[in-house]
Image (tube, helix red, strand yellow):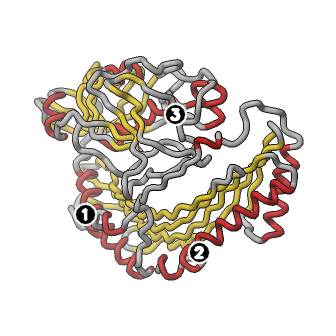
Amino acid sequence: MDLEKNSILTFTPADSFKNIVAETLELARASGATQAEAGLSVSQGLSVATRMGEVETIEHQQDNGLGISVYIGQHKGSASTSNLDPEAIRKTVEAACNIARYTSEDPCTGLADAELMAREFHGLDLYHPWDIQPQEVIELVLECENAALDYDPRIVNSEGATVDLNAGLSVYGNSHGFLQSEHKTRHGISCAVVAESGGNMQRDYWYDVSRHPDRLASARSIGEKAAERTLRRLDAHKIKTRQSAVLFAPELARGIVGSFAAAIGGAAQYRKASFLLDSVGERVFPEFVQLREQPFLPGALASANFDAEGVATRETDLLSDGVIQTYLLDSYSARKLGLKSTGHASGVHNLCLDSTGKTFEECLGAMYRGFYVTELMGHGVNTVTGDYSRGAAGFWVENGELEHAVEEVTIASNLRDMFNGVVEIGNDIDLRGGIRCGSMLIDNMTIAGSD
């Protein structure tokens, strides 16, 4: 499938979709809405999965959808449709207006303030269709999985390999006169395999994701990395319950940053459902910790010129010298708090946590003895109380070296203590998401294992 040549995104200019949004907004105005906003998205993709050398699934996706929110005074109604025909759109607008007439009045509802709309647009380099045919994709997936299966005789099974391609166009407009479109692509390769030795079986995986296909790691290297990670988990066993330093792998450390972002989110703040309530100006991390949002990084997975309400994004310090600088607000939560939107109606845009400069190996050395976590299970993170308790697997570290694999343990603490206990942030930064950070070393957590 050649996404660039065969895609609706190429055959139909973005202006055609912008016209649909503009006409939808005009229909809303004519139907009595005092304000309105509409978002249209179209996407096309291909996903191929193999298992044990056989093609398991080939899926072509083509989706589109239009969502409309209307405001009649301070009453809101929303409706959506996947049918972009004029009559279907008319009925959708009519439905949204009918809903608005029966909803309760809410003084905080409405569009984001007009003066906050984005007016400058950076070239973000987000659109790179993958010019590849389905048979070539199949060969790529098989190459990835075979690289894992052939890596070592102890690799005895596979949970499969997958290649995903996706290209999309989104348009957002509102009755402030804001109307903009964005093209984006996102491609990925992943593999998960099973190893066995002496009756012990372990599973692990690896993956890569990028907006540009040429920036993905090779299929072979992803398969080999999945196999390598799986093999090193063989002969894992529990450890005794103890207090210990814990080093989180980069892809897991970003979850800790994500918990911080959730706790300073507007909804959590106005609902008084955060352990970091009213925390702007408070030091919650050590002084060396700096966290900055950088929404204009070319090609990054969370780059954006504006949020889901058209509000301009901007480079922002969330943590400066460990001190909280701002909340993350959309227009509704901002009004609830008597503040202004910070451009976070669609989440965060490339949160970048500064490294302390140490490599992963140096972080292991700094820990000297402790638990290196490579997998987390469960959802035991409570951003209301800050309590943290999750199943974990990884490696016990002695003398700064990986000693043996560990499984079936639980790590627990409170997020406040974890934030305060950050000792090192590695330079092995993971770029595969909207939060960019390296390995994170925390000085002390409870590890619940065998008695």
Nearer to us of marks 1 and 2 is 2
The residue located at (48%, 52%) in the rendering is 304
Eyeballing the image, is 19 above or below 115? Answer: below
The residue located at (79%, 44%) in the rendering is 71
Q: What is the C-alpha distance between the residues marked 2 and 3?
A: 34 Å
The label number, if any, that marks residue 221 in the structure image? 1
Mark toward the start of the polypeptide (3 vs 1): 1
Tell me which amino acid carries mark 1.
Answer: Ser
Q: SS class of the residue under badge 2?
A: loop
- Dividing the picture into quarters, in which one does residue 214 lie? bottom left
**How many numbered discs sit on the rendered protein?**
3
Question: Residue 232 in the image: x percent, y percent?
Answer: 22, 48
Judged left or right of residue 343, residue 231 is left
Nearer to us of marks 2 and 3 is 2
Question: Residue 22 in the image: x percent, y percent?
Answer: 71, 62
The label number, if any, that marks residue 328 in the structure image? 3
Q: What is the C-alpha distance between the residues marked 3 and 1?
A: 38 Å
Q: What is the C-alpha distance between the residues marked 1 and 2?
A: 38 Å
Is there CB contact under 8 Å for labels 3 and 1? no
The label number, if any, that marks residue 13 in the structure image? 2
